[in-house]
Image (cartoon, grey):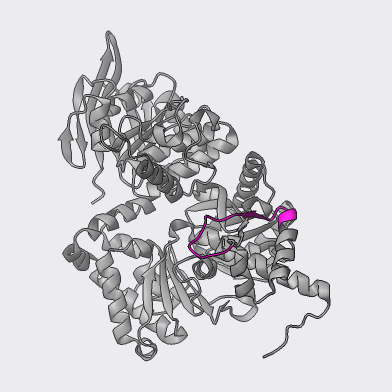
């Protein structure tokens, strides 16, 4: 097969007069980590938000598991099995781990929540990822470290049996030691068969976990390459200049304007 | 019955203490009463030992939930993971994983990263392991007291020298001495399949099975053997390479210089070919494909029939050679569709003479998942630690 689980073609997005994304094509494959890299303002976060249903795209098609879909709201995305983890540790501070993992999708009847089954599921999910740094699943999130919060956010996507996880700079707010622990989790998500998209600014991180690198340059997708085939330097050139040797945008003299 | 070669009271106490710790480490929390029966020691001896360990912070005692029986419940003894922490390193061809593992076999923290070209060189790997370890240890506020390393290659047990790890393109690397020099703790280096077998024996599905074979497929295929409760090792610790058993004369050439090794028929690349996946697809993609295939038994047999036949053939040889009670299949094999696993086990039981004699060898997949070698490396490191905690 190697049919991509998420297949995006010709996606465009404008904010008023600003054309942010130009004819973006992107494939996300199950079992692979695809790193999405690019300079500030290249459109990485916008692209993720379009996939997640936060922004509506102006044109373009999205196929999920081979079928065309229309993602109009974050709820549509969640129903398809697309989960997003944001850089700013988007969890509710006043709630505990179980409550956060089930936020908005609680189990039980409308009168009584099934706390026992939710707690069990949360504990089993964390154990399946062999996350043992959290002492109790009833710890309020405000008492967790940055790395632990990000772990909870990622574990949420496993709990909901997601097919695709989009991570928007999951390690931007973390220290070095915690970054590595989160990256380890990201790598193991892919080994469990999920399609993972990782946005990152850190080249070392990208090379440590990604199987494939997609480079955005000024709103255009200039290259999608296997990590094995490229060097650090080439990826940096792609990010800053949009091309490196034969990869990326055509040389200016050949460019069609 | 031979008497134990210990005589002086303090030696007896030390011996009892380390057997008690081993029991807690492998078996998890137990009551004092169970400890007394299992070790065949007096209750007051157990009390003295447990009190000593509790004072040193190695175990914690807790009143268990009231049981059904009459009388005062025996105190539950729980090992404290932080009391003894080892560093486990699992070097694979495409990635490296490290973990700090506490007493009782609990993974307290972990890191991993992919390897490409230059980062696969021994020096780069060692540096990265050391750097990640110090970061992780500082973050968790733990200090490892020993280190176990799993390597997919031929390893000399005595000093941890990697003689040859062809898939990594390593040869003659003094891994053990370089790591122990930098970490300043004892380092055990072992073949990955041997350590996988150890993990299955102590913590996996084959717990307590004294004769077992562990076969796993990464890029290469490896096998580890536990015979009568102890790992089987060849001369000077070089273990047999099951993956290089020749099963197909006139088959595909193998990097080891022979033609038709088992590995060339059932390794990762053979599996990729059988699934008609491109050669660049990563491990996760193979797992996804196998999982999807698992939902359709008819298609599974059609696609993986030949693969299953080669797996069966090799396993028949393995079972006839070692006569294990149980064969544990790890890594990629654990993701094979259930119908294929069933077919392979049935065929092996039918065709192997030894299996027929012992009344049917058990063949099943590993329950430890991708962490099996990491846990094996930790157990190898713990071997020397439990006596001195």
Left or right: B333 in relation to B138:
left
Q: Is residue A208 visible in the rendered structure shown here?
A: no
User: Residue A126 lies in what quarter of the image?
Assistant: top left
Tell me if residue A96 comes above or below residue B294 in the rendering.
Answer: above
Query: x, y (%) of residue A89?
Result: 46, 27
Q: In the rendered structure, does residue B175 fall within the stretch colored magenta? A: no
- Quadrant where the N terminus of chain B sits is bottom right
Is A115 located above or below residue B227 in the figure? above
Q: Give left or right: position of B164 versus A224.
A: right
Q: Residue at x 68, y 53 (%)?
A: B83
Please report the residue visible at 69 percent of the width from the left and 68 percent of the height from the top.
B46
Please name the residue shown 26% across and 74% down the image: B343
Q: Main secondary structure of the magenta part?
A: loop
Q: Position of residue B316 (x, y in %)?
A: 36, 82
Q: Residue at x 27, y 38 (%)?
A: A81
Q: Is A202 in front, or is B149?
A: B149
* Residue placed most toward the observer, B42 or B137: B42
Above or below: residue B29 compared with residue A253: below
Q: Position of residue A131 (x, y in %)?
A: 49, 46
What is the total number of numbered labels drawn onto the structure image?
0
Specify the segment rendered in magenta: B54-71
Q: Is residue A225 left or right of residue B1?
A: left
- The answer to whether residue A219 of the structure is visible from this angle is yes
Hey, which quadrant is residue A227 in on the image? top left
x and y percentages locating residue B194 in the rendered image: 53, 70
């Amino acid at each position: 097969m190697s049919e991509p689980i998420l297949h995006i073609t010709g996606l465009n997005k404008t904010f008023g007069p600003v054309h942010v994304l130009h004819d973006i094509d992107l494939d996300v494959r199950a079992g692979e980590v695809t790193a999405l890299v690019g300079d500030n303002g290249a459109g990485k976060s916008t692209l993720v938000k379009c996939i997640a249903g936060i922004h509506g795209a102006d044109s373009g098609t999205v196929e999920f598991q081979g079928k065309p879909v229309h993602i109009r709201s974050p709820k549509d995305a969640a129903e398809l099995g697309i989960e997003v983890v944001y850089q700013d540790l988007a969890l509710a501070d006043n709630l505990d781990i179980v409550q956060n993992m089930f936020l908005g999708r609680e189990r039980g009847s409308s009168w009584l929540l099934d706390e026992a089954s939710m707690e069990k599921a949360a504990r089993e999910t964390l154990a399946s990822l062999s996350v043992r740094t959290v002492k109790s699943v009833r710890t309020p999130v405000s008492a967790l470290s940055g790395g632990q919060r990000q772990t909870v956010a990622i574990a949420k996507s496993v709990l909901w049996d997601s097919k695709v996880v989009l991570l928007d700079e999951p390690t931007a707010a973390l220290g070095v030691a915690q970054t590595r622990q989160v990256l380890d989790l990201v790598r193991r998500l892919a080994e469990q068969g999920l399609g993972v998209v990782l946005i990152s600014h850190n080249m070392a991180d990208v090379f440590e976990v990604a199987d494939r690198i997609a480079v955005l340059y000024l709103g255009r997708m200039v290259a999608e390459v296997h990590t094995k085939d490229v060097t650090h330097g080439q990826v940096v050139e792609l990010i800053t200049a949009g091309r490196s040797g034969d990869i990326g945008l055509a040389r200016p003299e050949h460019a069609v304007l | 019955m031979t008497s134990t070669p210990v005589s002086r009271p303090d030696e007896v106490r030390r011996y009892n203490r380390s057997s008690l710790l081993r029991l807690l480490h492998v078996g998890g929390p137990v009551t004092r009463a169970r400890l007394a029966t299992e070790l065949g020691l007096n209750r007051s001896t157990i009390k003295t030992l447990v009190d000593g360990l509790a004072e040193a912070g190695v175990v914690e005692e807790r009143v268990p939930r009231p049981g059904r029986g009459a009388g005062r419940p025996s105190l539950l003894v729980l090992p404290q993971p932080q009391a003894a922490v080892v560093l486990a390193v699992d070097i694979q061809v495409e990635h490296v994983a490290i973990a700090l593992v506490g007493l009782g076999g609990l993974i307290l923290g972990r890191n991993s990263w992919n390897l490409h070209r230059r980062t696969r060189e021994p020096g780069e790997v060692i540096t990265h392991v050391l750097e990640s370890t110090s970061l992780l240890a500082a973050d968790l506020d733990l200090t490892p007291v020993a280190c176990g390393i799993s390597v997919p290659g031929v390893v000399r047990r005595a000093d941890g020298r990697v003689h040859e790890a062809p898939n990594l393109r390593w040869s003659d690397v003094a891994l053990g001495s370089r790591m122990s020099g930098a970490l300043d703790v004892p380092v055990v280096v072992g073949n990955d399949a041997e350590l996988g077998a150890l993990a299955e024996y102590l913590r996996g599905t084959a717990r307590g099975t004294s004769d077992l074979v562990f076969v796993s497929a990464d890029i290469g295929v490896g096998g580890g053997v536990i015979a009568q409760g102890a790992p089987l090792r060849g001369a000077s610790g070089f273990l047999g390479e099951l993956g290089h058993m020749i099963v197909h004369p006139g088959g595909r050439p193998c990097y080891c210089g022979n033609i038709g090794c088992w590995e060339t028929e059932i390794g990762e690349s053979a599996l990729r070919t059988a699934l008609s996946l491109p050669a660049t697809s990563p491990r996760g993609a193979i797992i996804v494909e196998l999982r999807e295939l698992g939902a359709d038994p008819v298609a599974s047999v059609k696609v993986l029939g030949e693969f299953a036949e080669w797996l069966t053939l090799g396993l028949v040889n393995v079972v006839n050679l070692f006569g294990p009670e149980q064969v544990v299949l790890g890594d990629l094999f654990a993701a094979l569709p259930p119908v294929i696993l069933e077919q392979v086990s049935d065929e092996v039981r039918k065709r192997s003479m030894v299996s027929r004699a012992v009344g049917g060898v058990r063949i099943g997949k590993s329950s430890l998942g991708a962490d099996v070698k990491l846990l094996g490396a930790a157990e190898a490191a713990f071997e020397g630690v439990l006596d001195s905690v």
